[in-house]
Amino acid sequence: MPDRRLTLPGLGMTHRGVLRTVSGVAAACGALLALPACGSGGSASSCPSSATKRTVQYASIAGVPANRTSLDLYVPAAEGKCTKRPIVVWVHGGAWTDGDKSEYMEDKIPLFNDAGYVFASVNYRLTDKTTDPAHPQPQWPVHNQDTADALAWIIHHAGEFGGDTRRVAVLGHSAGGGIVAAISADPRYLAKDDLELKSIKCAGSMDGEGYDVVAGATTAPPEWKPVYLAAFGTDPAVWEDASPIRKVAPDKGIPRYFIAAQGIEWRLQQHAAWYHALQAAHVAVTVLDARSLEHADLTTAVGAPGDTVVTPPLMDFLAGCFSR
């Protein structure tokens, strides 16, 4: 079992991230439930690359365009009896004000489907700064709650598309990473749909933003603070309540975590604080040193041909997490 040692400023240590070798469809379809692998040989390449796309409106909210509360579901072509497939859910970034589930999907869909995973990309309501710059709407908690509602739809309907509700991963980039942190550490979002934190088996923050809203609203670089104030408002009590890092505690069911860390010193400090909070709560964490990349690379590189920095360790993490 390979491992790699990662040293990041602010972590105060050399973090040893044990990354399991990807075992392809054998891990995706058979490791946990002793189900047969898709195709022969148990390799990812033996799984069909074609996928069925389905767009679903997971919630209907008056005055909100249907696309904003919708998700795209990509199901690998069915072969044999491999029907209990792990589920990977992607949450896009965009500073809580921009972005769409359709962005940067061209490499992710074949990556996850060829590994035998059901893949979903979700939308959520965005803060509109143009309506009232002083009081933009909507604000927290809609981004988190919408994403949790989308995840709940996927879990409650998994039987319709051969998904395995015992192996669900949620990954997010930038603000999407902060949303993932919130719904994987704060039980109230999933509780609205009668789910617990343990409904998520694996979580990942791809250069996430928003672990600590208090820090974002008070100590972030000047050009970043307005982003936090737009999405979370100006009430310090709300900043506190909205901060995933303040919800982390042992024995809550917080899933195993993958953190891809990149950025300036302040951002690395936020990654380090999130890492230490999870470690203190006895959550298994894998850290990827992504300082050689740009912020956008932590979404565009996922599944990109020739990528050796992001995709292999992420897929190793998922295979190892799903097999436990």
Image (spheres, rainbow, N blue to C red):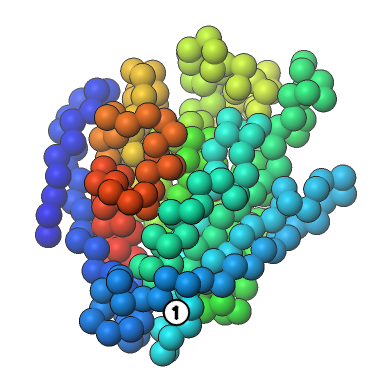
Q: Seen from this angle, which residue lies furthest top?
A: 222
Q: Where residue 215 sits: x, y (%)?
A: 49, 20
Closer to us: 275 or 92: 92
Quarter that holds the C terminus: bottom left
10 Å crowding of disc 1: few (<14), some (14-19), many (20+): many
Q: Residue at x 23, y 81 (%)?
A: 41
Q: Seen from this angle, which residue lies furthest bottom?
A: 80
Which secondary structure, mark 1?
loop
Q: Is residue 5 left or right of residue 253?
A: left
What residue does disc 1 label? 84
Q: Residue at x 39, y 60 (%)?
A: 111
Q: Is residue 305 left or right of residue 237?
A: left
Q: Amino acid at mark 1?
A: Lys
Closer to us: 305 or 30: 305
* Up-down relation of residue 115 to residue 37 (above or below): above
Q: Where residue 69 sits: x, y (%)?
A: 72, 52
Q: Residue at x 39, y 36 (%)?
A: 297
Q: Where residue 30 sits: x, y (%)?
A: 32, 80
Q: Please tell me in which quadrant of the rendered image residue 277 appears.
A: top left
Closer to us: 286 or 97: 97
Q: Seen from this angle, which residue lies furthest front?
A: 305
Q: Is residue 313 left or right of residue 181?
A: left
* Up-down relation of residue 185 to residue 110 (above or below): above
Q: Residue at x 54, y 13 (%)?
A: 223
Q: Is residue 70 left or right of residue 324?
A: right
Q: Where residue 204 sits: x, y (%)?
A: 40, 47
Quarter that holds the N terminus: bottom left
* Up-down relation of residue 216 to residue 29 (above or below): above
Count of marks placed on residues = 1
* Up-down relation of residue 219 to residue 178 (above or below): above
